[in-house]
């Protein structure tokens, strides 16, 4: 009978580093994964998850190295305690940057082998971490104005008649940059009307308006 191997984490921005960690941990036996709940992550890390817990559970369970996954019922950094008490694993595997004396003592008291793995990327791939991915995401602009006037406030153009080309790229609720819309206007009244008609007051859309001098 294979040993039961347990790992625990948030796995919110699931990446190749997580998959490689699961692969390495599964070499010790059948791999079981505890996943931090939305409530725990909000309380412990003070931010909402990108993916809700049920979706994260689905993704982790779909990885071939994982035998079964659970949503941890505990809270804080030791939120996995109820899962461990239910599963009774033989091994608890952690990455070096997730190791702690508290976890080591927890395993020692229960006769669980405590294994620390160095974080290594899969062969041929770059090293990945959730922290690094979040840093990259934070560099993506939430709005990009390439030229011209404020098309989501069309009345501004009334004070400076003439040619104006404005390109504003704004992510929608899904984080995608919407396709560009081109339009030509002959006067400021029509500009304001068309701006509203095309949703330029709605910051979730990408808008481009070209106004001609009367």
Image (cartoon, rainbow, N blue to C red):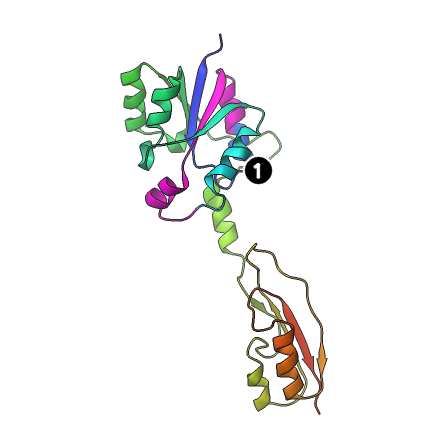
Nearest to the observer: residue 190 or residue 31: 190
Nearest to the observer: residue 123 or residue 89: 89
Q: Residue at coordinates 60% horizontally, 35% vertically from top-left?
A: 125
Residue 43: within the magenta? yes
Image: 209 above or below 57: below
- Residue bounds of the magenta highlight: 21-48
Q: Is residue 93 left or right of residue 176?
A: left
Residue furthest bottom in the image: 214
Q: Residue at coordinates 52% horizontally, 17% vertically from top-left?
A: 27
Q: Position of residue 107 (x, y in %)?
A: 32, 20
Residue annotated with mark 1: 126
Image: 18 above or below 157: above
Q: Which corner quadrant of the image does residue 198 belong to?
A: bottom right
Q: Position of residue 90 (x, y in %)?
A: 40, 14
Q: Residue at coordinates 46% horizontally, 27% vertically from top-left?
A: 33
Q: Is residue 134 left or right of residue 176?
A: left
Q: Position of residue 179 (x, y in %)?
A: 68, 62
Callout 1: helix, strand or loop?
Answer: loop
Q: Residue at coordinates 45% horizontally, 12% vertically from top-left?
A: 3
Q: Position of residue 31 (x, y in %)?
A: 49, 21
């Amino acid at each position: 009978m294979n040993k039961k191997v347990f790992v625990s984490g948030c796995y919110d921005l699931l990446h190749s580093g997580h998959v490689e960690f699961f692969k390495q941990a599964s070499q010790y036996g059948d791999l079981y994964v505890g996943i931090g709940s939305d409530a725990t992550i909000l309380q412990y890390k003070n931010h909402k998850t990108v993916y809700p817990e049920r979706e994260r559970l689905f993704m982790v369970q779909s990885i071939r190295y994982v035998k079964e996954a659970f949503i941890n019922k505990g809270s804080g950094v030791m939120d996995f305690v109820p899962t461990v008490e239910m599963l009774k694993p033989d091994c608890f595997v952690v990455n070096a940057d997730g190791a702690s004396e508290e976890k080591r003592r927890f395993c020692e008291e229960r006769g669980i082998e405590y294994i620390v793995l160095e974080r290594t990327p899969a062969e041929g791939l770059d090293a990945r971490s959730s922290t690094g991915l979040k840093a990259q995401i934070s560099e993506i602009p939430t709005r990009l104005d390439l030229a011209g006037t404020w098309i989501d406030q069309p009345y501004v153009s009334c004070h400076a008649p003439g040619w104006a080309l404005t390109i504003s790229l704004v992510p929608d609720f899904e984080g995608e940059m919407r396709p560009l819309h081109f339009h030509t206007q002959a006067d400021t009244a029509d500009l304001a009307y068309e701006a509203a008609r095309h949703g330029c007051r709605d910051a979730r859309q990408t808008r481009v308006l070209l106004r001609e001098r009367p």
